[in-house]
Amino acid sequence: MADTFSGRNTYTYDCEFKEDGKTIDLISIGMVSGDGREFYAVSNEFNTRRVANDDWLMKNVMTSIEHEQFVIQDFEGTPVLRDFVVTDPAAMSKADMGNALLDFIFGPGTSPSKGTPPELWNWYGAYDHVALCQIWGSMMSLPPGMPMFSNDIKQLHKEAGYPSMPRQPEGLHNALADAKFNIVRYNYLKAKAKAEKEFNIRQAVANHTLLSER
């Protein structure tokens, strides 16, 4: 693993989704490569009515996704959101999203089976990895060359002893903004680990010098 997030074949991503303990319904995905390329897409296949009934998703996720709301009034005259239509220019079908992702990762026209498997990173990413893979369908439908696992930056956080982490200043729960901030997290933890390793080496050298002088 590199000391900084870099390289054409290294990717970090984030997914926004509606989950109910049984299904993970993808809303949007953002991905950034180690060489600075960016990918963002919104699904036009998720169940909009279920998302419309989820206050948290409407307040935290859908605020950065363009859509038109269908609002009615209840018997007391209070506006109630019943459904919405996704109008975001990044909206596309899962089939188109899957093809666009493969072009982004492996290069246009390159067969995934002949490309170099990407190194994937995310943050608290168990559900994100499933949402990513299900863009292509079942586990058996995962394109050759696409990893069946993602590295989790949270594991680096654990290895570092759970230090305080940088706070994302803006764009929280926008998939692309979250993916970009994963790089900040990765670089922060790698720099912290490198500094600690160098400190331990200096301490070991100093202790050895003291013992040699006795």
Image (spheres, grey):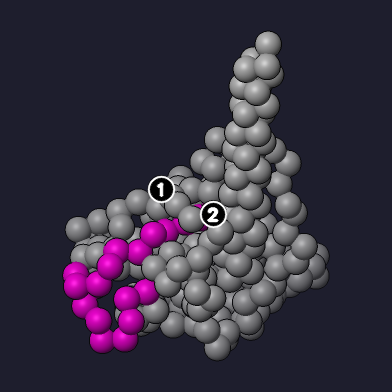
Horizontal side, residue 107 vs residue 51: left or right: left
Residue farthest to the top, as pictured: 214
What number is the disc on residue 22?
A: 1
The x, y position of residue 45, in whole percent, is 43, 74
Task: Judge whether 50 appears above or below 198 on screen.
Answer: below
In the image, what residue occupies the spot 62% across and 40% down? Answer: 198
Dot placed on the residue nearer the N-terminal end, 1 or 2: 2
Q: Residues within 10 Å of mark 1 (few under 14, many from 20)?
A: few
In the image, what residue occupies the spot 21% across and 65% down? Answer: 144
Quick check: is 80 in the magenta stretch? no
Q: Residues within 10 Å of mark 2 (few under 14, many from 20)?
A: some
- Marks 1/2: CA distance? 38 Å
In the image, what residue occupies the spot 51% across and 78% down? Answer: 37
Residue 182 visible in the current orientation: no
Q: Quadrant of the C terminus?
A: top right
The x, y position of residue 167, in whole percent, is 75, 54
Per the image, label 2 sits on a secondary structure element best described as loop
Horizontal side, residue 23 vs residue 205: left or right: left
Range of magenta residues:
105-123
What number is the disc on residue 3?
A: 2
